[in-house]
Amino acid sequence: MNAAETNVRRRLIKLLVALLAVLLLGAMGLYQLMNARTFQLAGELTDRVATEEKVVALTFDDGPDENTPEIIDILAEQRVRATFFVIGAQVEARPQDAQALVAAGHQLANHTYTHRRMVFVSPATVASEVERTDAAIRMAGQRGEILFRPPTGKKLLVLPLYLADNQRRTVMWDVEPDSGKAPTATEIVAAVREETRPGSIILLHPWYANGRNTREAVKGLITGLRDQGYRFVTVSELLADRAGRRPR
């Protein structure tokens, strides 16, 4: 191989390396955008309400399931109303649990019908996942605005555009003590007490067998935050407080 061929080869290698770097950076950017808790490409998103008042929203993702009565009893004992981002298929399978949550004064919100990740999906898939769940929530007795939270918080373009076109708000969170791990109840309580700020939206997963520690932590984290001067509201009430209006 002569010098000219060697130079061409080196240039091609450098070009290939540069192209791979661009693709890698692009993939990393898409990943960060997909998982961003404070930003999406279209529509309204809330991860926390900016306020000096010590008020927080307690939210539960997934479900409902056979643990619903236990969760209702804990919240009733503590006089707390929460927001439940439910899975449409679960609501249809256990309508009595969804109705019990509404009857107890809690807010039902949309967490898609099958809990599939809402990225790289068609507009028709997004519409079906959201609207079927809306219908199930309405059948359970929920009135007023139905808020939405994407499974695992993931979204890119199709989902935000659908939500923006339909004047729907994405609700994320800023405190998540049990996501993707298995902390003890004591660890969950400690994390919530340490990370919560005025206007926080707290995310919990109390369902199924692996949610046992979270269920055990609910009372302790409520009393712990009350000791710090916090009061609990639904997400719609938190948003209404920010806007200076009553929830619909």
Image (tube, grey):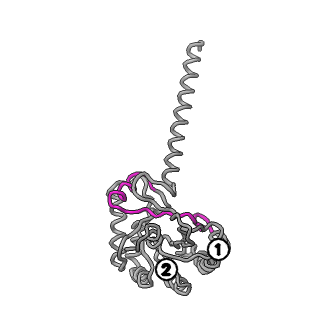
Residue 150, compared with residue 88, is above or below; it is: above
Which image quadrant is residue 183 in? bottom right
Q: Which mark is residue 169?
A: none
Instruction: Identify the element where label 2 is drawn.
Output: loop
Name the quadrant of the N terminus.
top right
Residue shown at the point (42%, 74%) measured from the top left:
108
Q: Which residue shows up at 39% across the image and 80% down it? A: 95
* Magenta span of residues: 155-182
Circle count: 2
Q: Nearer the viewer, residue 76 or 236?
A: 236
Q: Earlier in the sequence, mark 1 or mark 2?
A: 2
Reply yes or no: does residue 159 show up in magenta. Answer: yes
Q: In the rendered image, which residue does mark 2 sit on?
A: 81
* Residue 46: % across, % down: 47, 62
Q: Main secondary structure of the magenta part?
A: loop
> Residue 117: image x %, image y %?
45, 59
Residue 87 lies in the magenta-colored region: no
> Which residue appears at 53% of the width and 45% of the height?
28
